[in-house]
Amino acid sequence: MIKSLFSKLRQGPAKEDAKTDAARLLPISDYTMPEPDLWEPVSQACTQAQLEEPHYSHWCAQIREEPRMHRKQWEYCYIMQALHINGMIEEGRHALGFGVGNEPMAAMLAHNGVTVLGTDLAPQKAKSAGWIDTDQHAISKQQLNERNICDPQEFERLVDFRFMDMNKIDRDLAGQFDFVWSACAFEHLGSIAKGLEFVVNSAKCLKPGGLAIHTTEFNCSSNDETVDNASTVLFRKRDFEMLENRLKSKGCRMKFNWNLGQKPLDLHIDMPPYSANDHLKLQIEQYLVTSFGIIIHKD
């Protein structure tokens, strides 16, 4: 069914046909909501329309990448746009990155005058988890500027690095930062419960008025059955609704858009071995999955 739907959409379906196909393939999606946009992001899924907006290309240029129809690239652009629109990419801001690996975010932020503390798992634990073998782990802060996005002297001055387990955030970081972020990391903490606990604890690192932005894996096909207690877990809509309630009691707020898109690539499911392009949704076990971003405002 997946392949036939995608073939049909590539031929240019009628608008109502697209809605019907989308509702069948993505039962979690709420098509009464407007499609999410990247210009003013809320907590939302990766969709084709966002990657077609002009500022998507702008952020790709900032991290020295060519724009691609790929959800992992979207995660960086989503985080950067959310920070930008909330006035966080400014000189004098202080940021904390979790599980930074070899991502370009720290260098981009330092290039714009932000003081950054990047963190990643200690090497021995990272090796046993497979992050070193797959080149997704940082062992020093110099790795965070491999693309030479930031002037080396400015990078040295503005960026610091330490090893830290996301399940055990260091206590000295509480209340110290204007914003915190992670890109597709907290689904790897062992369970849905541990991932949600991390997000709650990450907000404790914020100053009043601060912002937490995280991206993760989202189950598009079920609000009940999912993957839990595994090396990669899949969060459901109900998990994020529970998270919102927990954070509300701690003086934080969130806003969601549950429209998962209905353009051709929103309904195309990439299968292993995954493509370097046309990769917005994929299949993990029996579930349809995409990237989802969450934005938390601390009052």
Image: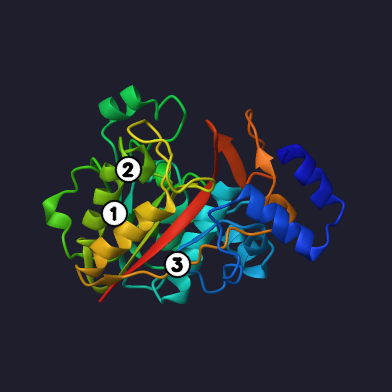
Judging by the rendered image, the residue that carries numbered circle 3 is 256
| Residue pictured at 82% horizontal, 44% vertical | 7
Tell me, yes or no, if residue 219 can be seen here. yes
Residue 183, image x, y percentages: 43, 50
Residue 8, image x, y percentages: 83, 48
Q: Earlier in the sequence, mark 1 or mark 2?
A: 2
Circle 3 packing at 10 Å, graded few (<14), some (14-19), many (20+), is some
For the residues carrying marks 3 and 1, which lies nearer the camera in this image? 3
Circles 3, 1 touching at the beta carbon (< 8 Å) = no
Circle 1 packing at 10 Å, graded few (<14), some (14-19), many (20+), is many
The C terminus: image quadrant: bottom left
Judging by the rendered image, the residue that carries numbered circle 2 is 192
Residue 124 versus residue 12 in the image, above or below: above
Q: Secondary structure at mark 1?
A: helix
Q: CA distance from mark 3 to mark 2?
A: 19 Å
Residue extending farthest to the left is 171
In the figure, is residue 263 to the left or right of 59?
Answer: right
Circles 3, 2 touching at the beta carbon (< 8 Å) = no
Depth order, front residue of 250/30: 30
Looking at the rendered structure, the kind of residue marked 3 is Phe
In the figure, is residue 74 to the left or right of 141?
Answer: right
In the figure, is residue 121 to the left or right of 240?
Answer: left
Q: CA distance from mark 3 to mark 1?
A: 16 Å
Q: Earlier in the sequence, mark 3 or mark 2?
A: 2
| Residue pictured at 62% horizontal, 51% vertical | 65
Q: CA distance from mark 1 to mark 2?
A: 11 Å
Circle number at residue 199: 1
Looking at the rendered structure, the kind of residue marked 1 is Val
Q: Secondary structure at mark 3?
A: loop
Residue extending farthest to the right is 11
Looking at the rendered structure, the kind of residue marked 2 is Ile
